[in-house]
Image (tube, rainbow, N blue to C red):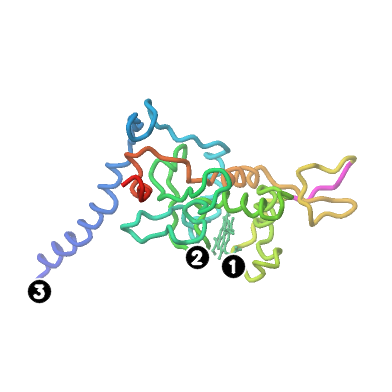
């Protein structure tokens, strides 16, 4: 083969992939407009605007800086790209105490407020799209004693501290915590472990932003019919 067709073939095979995987999705998703709700299908008029609360912008920055996206994804994949619905509590809770089955696919609106959608590179660790829901459910299962934020702090400080994840390969992010001498009252933000009579462990501002971001990982709010790729099946009687 001569050089010319080789170079052209190379350009075509990489260029086409680049066009379809990078450029086309970018053009389609860079400026997502609000979705108009319709009365018949959504039961309400107006526009759909996903709400997220927490330190999303700062937290996402700490998440990126520490390479969490290398091992954790944040997407319940659309079914055509590999079903995720069957995985326990990944796409939402199958048995949410208030709303029933809240599982759904992730969509571009779930990343509202973030500069980059950190969909992740690999699933070395569990998907985090709904990790806050899972942690809340774990706290509720223990009879409500506890706090999801405290679970996140403990995990970030030492993922192997919990006997259930003794062999966890999630790295420890100890450097996001500082040890401080107790002067007067101990801080109410101190970790429940690692302290002694004279010092205590405190989360740094970065750790607080990251945990606030993790606590906002509830990609299960109801979406308008226009976005719902897997609408619930009609009940037998309604058919
Ligand atoms: C080297 C890969 C790797 C990196 C990098 C990584 N993790 Fe993990 N993570 C894992 C693995 C594996 C698990 C599963 C074991 C466990 O639960 O500890 C896990 C578990 C978790 C869990 C518990 C999830 C659940 O559903 O129980 C959280 C939360 C978490 N990681 C947060 C983070 C955050 C935040 C970062 C970045 C600061 C991060 N991880 C970076 C591999 C990684």
155 w.r.t. 186: above or below: below
Q: Are marks 3 and 1 in contact (CB under 8 Å)?
A: no
Percent position (x, y) of residue 23?
A: 26, 48
Res. 144 in view: yes
| Front residue of this view, candidates 66 and 155 | 155
Q: Give the mark toward the camera: 2 or 3.
A: 2
The quarter holding residue 36 reads: top left
Label ID, residue 1: 3
**Secondary structure found at label 3:** loop
Q: Earlier in the sequence, mark 2 or mark 1?
A: 2
Which quarter is ligand 1 in?
Answer: bottom right
Q: Which residue is mark 1?
A: 169
Query: Split into 4 quadrants, where in the image is the N terminus?
Result: bottom left
Q: Earlier in the sequence, mark 2 or mark 3?
A: 3
Give me the residue at 42% from left, 59% from top.
84
| Neighbours of disc 2 within 10 Å: few (<14), some (14-19), many (20+) | few
Q: Give the mark toward the camera: 3 or 1.
A: 1
Mark 3 → mark 1, Cα distance in angstroms:
48 Å
| Neighbours of disc 3 within 10 Å: few (<14), some (14-19), many (20+) | few
Give me the residue at 37% from left, 26% from top.
45
Q: Which residues are magenta?
A: 178-183
């Amino acid at each position: 083969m001569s050089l010319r067709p080789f170079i052209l073939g190379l350009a075509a095979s990489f260029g086409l992939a680049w066009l379809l995987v990078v450029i086309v999705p970018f053009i389609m998703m860079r400026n997502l407009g609000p979705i108009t709700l319709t009365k018949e299908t959504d039961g309400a008029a107006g526009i759909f605007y996903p709400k997220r609360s927490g330190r999303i912008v700062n937290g996402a920055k700490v998440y990126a800086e520490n390479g969490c996206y290398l091992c954790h994804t944040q997407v319940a994949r659309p079914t055509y790209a590999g079903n995720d619905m069957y995985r326990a509590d990944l796409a939402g809770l199958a048995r949410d105490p208030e709303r029933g089955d809240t599982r759904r696919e992730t969509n571009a609106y779930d990343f509202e407020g973030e500069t980059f959608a950190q969909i992740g590179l690999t699933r070395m660790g569990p998907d985090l799209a709904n990790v806050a829901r899972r942690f809340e459910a774990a706290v509720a299962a223990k009879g409500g004693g506890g706090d999801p934020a405290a679970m996140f702090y403990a995990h970030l400080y030492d993922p192997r501290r919990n006997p259930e994840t003794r062999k966890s390969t999630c790295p420890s992010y100890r450097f996001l915590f500082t040890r401080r001498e107790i002067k007067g009252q101990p801080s109410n933000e101190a970790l429940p472990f690692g302290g002694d009579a004279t010092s205590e462990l405190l989360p740094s501002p970065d750790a607080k932003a990251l945990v606030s971001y993790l606590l906002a990982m509830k990609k299960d709010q109801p979406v308008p019919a226009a976005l719902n790729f897997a609408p619930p099946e009609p009940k037998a009687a309604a058919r």
